[in-house]
Amino acid sequence: MESPGNLFVVAAPSGTGKSSLVKALMELDAKLAVSVSHTSRSPRGQEQHGREYWFVTTDEFQDMVAADAFLEWAEVHGNLYGTSKAALQSRIEAGEDVVLEIDYQGAMQVKTLFPQAVLIFILPPSWDELRQRLVRRGDTEPAVIQARMDNARHEVAQAKHFDYVVVNAVFETALFDLKTIVHAARLKYAAQVRHRSAVFQALNLL
Ligand code: 5GP
């Protein structure tokens, strides 16, 4: 599949600060759009249908799988999550830069479909810090924390398949790193040909 816009995929274990970083990145960069995924899990807290996720039943999700409506999908922590083709296609075709905030399994599927996608993995600075962040976030049940830590060890082992790694020790530094990756992707030759075609034409490069 061809994509005139840049496609960024951000993955990280829960508690790493991925959502806060992606939210801050969106606020800084009006040219970035985040794709809203479908999920079979129930809304949490203030989450709204169509804002954080499209909340659907497991049956509805499976119908979409059968109809080949997903670009990628995966089971994460017992729930189903997927990026619908419809959510992405129009934005990518319009040349917009899109961010997918998905798990590593989905990231690998996207890389197969869009080899030029930029895969970014966010790491916690240490296992101790990750555990403390999970506790601070309100996951106080030892069994829940243990399950999240076990998942995190498995997820972190996949970071080697990603193009970039950001260590979220200090939020502002990690945000700067993310911005830098986005900026660098926009400076790649193919991206510049797309966005600065007048310059390339004037220099007889097209
Ligand atoms: P949460 O339920 O905490 O919002 O998300 C749980 C995990 O599912 C996170 O790692 C999140 O990035 C991932 N996730 C969210 N949307 C998608 C999606 O569309 N596809 C995949 N593969 N993972 C997703």
Image (cartoon, rainbow, N blue to C red):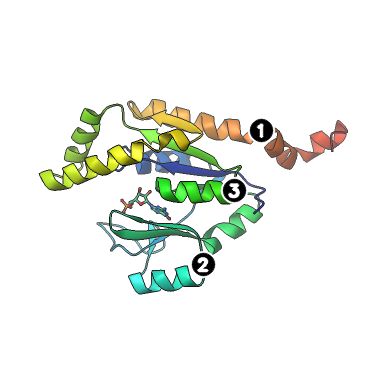
* In-image side of 92 versus 167 (left or right): right
Query: Does residue 107 appear in this view?
Result: yes
Q: Is residue 167 left or right of residue 35?
A: left
Residue at the (81%, 34%) spot, across then down: 200
Q: Quadrant of the N terminus?
A: bottom right
Residue 74 rendering spot, x and y as whole percentages:
40, 56
Question: Where, quadrant-wise, is the C terminus in this rendering?
Answer: top right
User: In the image, is the residue at mark 1 within 8 Å of ligand 1 by its beta carbon?
Assistant: no
Q: Which of pointers 2 and 3 lies earlier in the amino acid sequence?
A: 2
The residue sitting at 52% across, 29% down in the picture is 180
Q: Amino acid at mark 3?
A: Phe
- Give amino acid for label 2: Ala
Q: Which residue is mark 2?
A: 69
Badge 1 local density, few (<14 within 10 Å), some, or many (20+)?
few
Q: Secondary structure at mark 3?
A: loop
Which numbered disc, 3 or 1, marks the residue closer to the eye? 3
Q: Is residue 148 above or below residue 128?
A: below
Q: Is mark 2 within 8 Å of ligand 1?
A: no
- Check whether the beta carbons of the residues at disc 3 and disc 1 lie within 8 A of each other: no
Q: Which mark is residue 16?
A: none
Residue 114, label in figure:
3
71 or 160, which lies in front? Answer: 160
Residue 127, x across and y down, in percent: 24, 30
Marks counted in the figure total: 3
The quarter of the picture where residue 129 lies is top left
